[in-house]
Each structure stands twice: as C-alpha cells, then as structure tokens.
Amino acid sequence: MNLQILGCAGGIGGSEPYTTSLLIDNDVLLDAGTGLSRLSLEQLVAIDHVFISHSHLDHVAGLALLMDAVFGKRSKPVTVHATAEVLHALKTHIFNWIIWPDFSTLPNTEQPSMQYQEMQAGSTLTLGERVITSHPVDHVPGSVAYWVRSADKGFLFTGDMASTPALWENLGGQAGLNMVIVDCSFPNAEAELALLSKHFCPAALINDIAAVPAGIEFYIYHLKPGQEAQIMAELGQNKDRNFKALKIDDHFNF
Ligand SMILES: [Zn+2]
Ligand SMILES: [Zn+2]
C-alpha cells in the first residue's frame, strides 16, 4: 500500500500551500481538501473512493471540484464514505443545487456519478488488500479518524481533533499501526483557541498520547500558516518522541 500526501496544511499561505488530502495507491482519497487539485485529470478519474474525516471546508472543498472534473468520464460512481452527520452536511450545504449540483442524481438516479455510503464511527471496510477502520474523535459532530492498514502494516490519520483518550486506548497498541498523522494546529500560547476550536496544541497532544508505544512514528499535520516553526519547536522540546512535520509529496509504503 502506498500513501502520498497531496496536502496537509491547516490553511493557505504558509510553508505548506494545500489543505488536507491523502492519496492511497491511486484510487482512494482520505479527505478532499485543496491538495487534490494537484492531481492530473487522469489521476482524478482513477479515484473510486473518498473517505471524509469531517465536514469542514478545508477537508471537503476539493470534493465538489473532483466531481465536476470526472463527470461523464467514469463508468461507475465515486463512493463518498463518512458518518451520517458528515453526509448530511455535504448533502445539505454543498451538493444542494445552490453551492454545487447534486452529483448523486446526475446524470440520473439509476447511474449517478457519486454515491454516499454511510460509515458508522468504529466500523471497518475492506477494499482489496486495504482495511480501513474509523474511530470517533472530538472535533465537530461526526468527526472520525481513519486507521488504514494492509497485511500487518499501516497508519492512523486522525483528521482534525482535540483530546480523545479512547482513540489512543483502542488503537495505540494495535499490530498494524506503525505511524500516526495527527493534528497539532496551534502553538501552546494559543491553547485556549485550540481548545475552543477543538484542535491540539503541543502540550495537549503530548499529554493525550503519553501511553502510546514509543515505536510508533508521529507526523504532525494541519499546522496553522505562519506558526509551523513555533509549533514544531515546542513539540521538539519533548525528548520522548521524535515528531516530524508532514510535507507535501511525502510518500510512505506499508
Ligand atoms: Zn476541522
Ligand atoms: Zn481542518
């Protein structure tokens, strides 16, 4: 299984220019932020499944443009996987014929170009060799993390999140979890804003993951533009773990 980072920023204008989107092999996306705009038309047409962590615009903006780009060019629908809350938000606020066409009815309801597939938090879906499990996290209603593995190797993508002890208790020691991609949006000086907007700052993240085995690699994503160096410096003061900043075009093999 291959993982390519298309975008991982907490906003535009910073050292990482594109918002969250991760490509697994050539056919599965985790989140559909502006990072997916870097794919060619041929690559966009190859995407069969999109898993959405939560309904915020920086994670779904590219989904609307993806559907427009591939419309009429595929033989089967693009399947959008998310919790009921997130699917409801997409239907109500984006694919509503006001912001964007309802691609689940186009060109007709018998053979639509997009289909919604509810994935309850905590459930598992298998796509060929890839096994994907969602886990609820504290951010906006319906937010989930995705644990993706193939054979005995894999990674956890938390999406945006604040403290969720059950996530680390349930997944922290699992075989098939080698790497975690985790939100750390704000520096410690903005801990209050992090708490209000349900994101991590370094102190809160370090506290939350204290019991996670040391062998698991942590990559930080969703750093707020202009504060990347400060956040990473604060994380670097913790000598128990070696935190790395996730970068555009990082590739991982599992
Ligand atoms: Zn968010
Ligand atoms: Zn976000």
Image: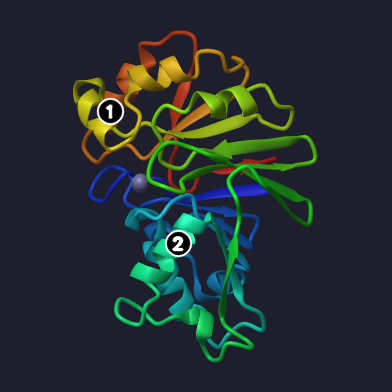
Q: Residues within 10 Å of mark 1 (few under 14, many from 20)?
A: some
Q: Is residue 187 above or below residue 237?
A: below
Q: Which residue is mark 1?
A: 229
Q: Which residue is mark 2?
A: 36
Quadrant of res 60: bottom left
- Residue under the image location 58 percent in, 18 percent down: 212
Pick out the residue farthest to the bottom: 107
- Residue under the image location 49 percent in, 9 percent down: 240
Image coordinates of residue 175 in percent, x first then y, are 74, 27
State which tag comes first along the sequence, 1 or 2: 2
- Residue under the image location 36 percent in, 52 percent down: 19
| Relative to 194, 20 lies left or right | right
Image coordinates of residue 141 in percent, x first then y, are 41, 47
Quadrant of res 253: top right
Image coordinates of residue 185 in percent, x first then y, are 32, 34
Between marks 1 and 2, how big is the CA–CA gap? 25 Å
Of 236 and 108, the residue lying toward us: 108
Image coordinates of residue 39 in percent, x first then y, are 48, 65
Mark 1 vs mark 2: in front: 2
Q: At label 2, which amino acid type do we have?
A: Leu
Of 155 and 80, the residue lying toward us: 80
| Relative to 34, 122 lies left or right | right
- Residue under the image location 28 percent in, 28 percent down: 229
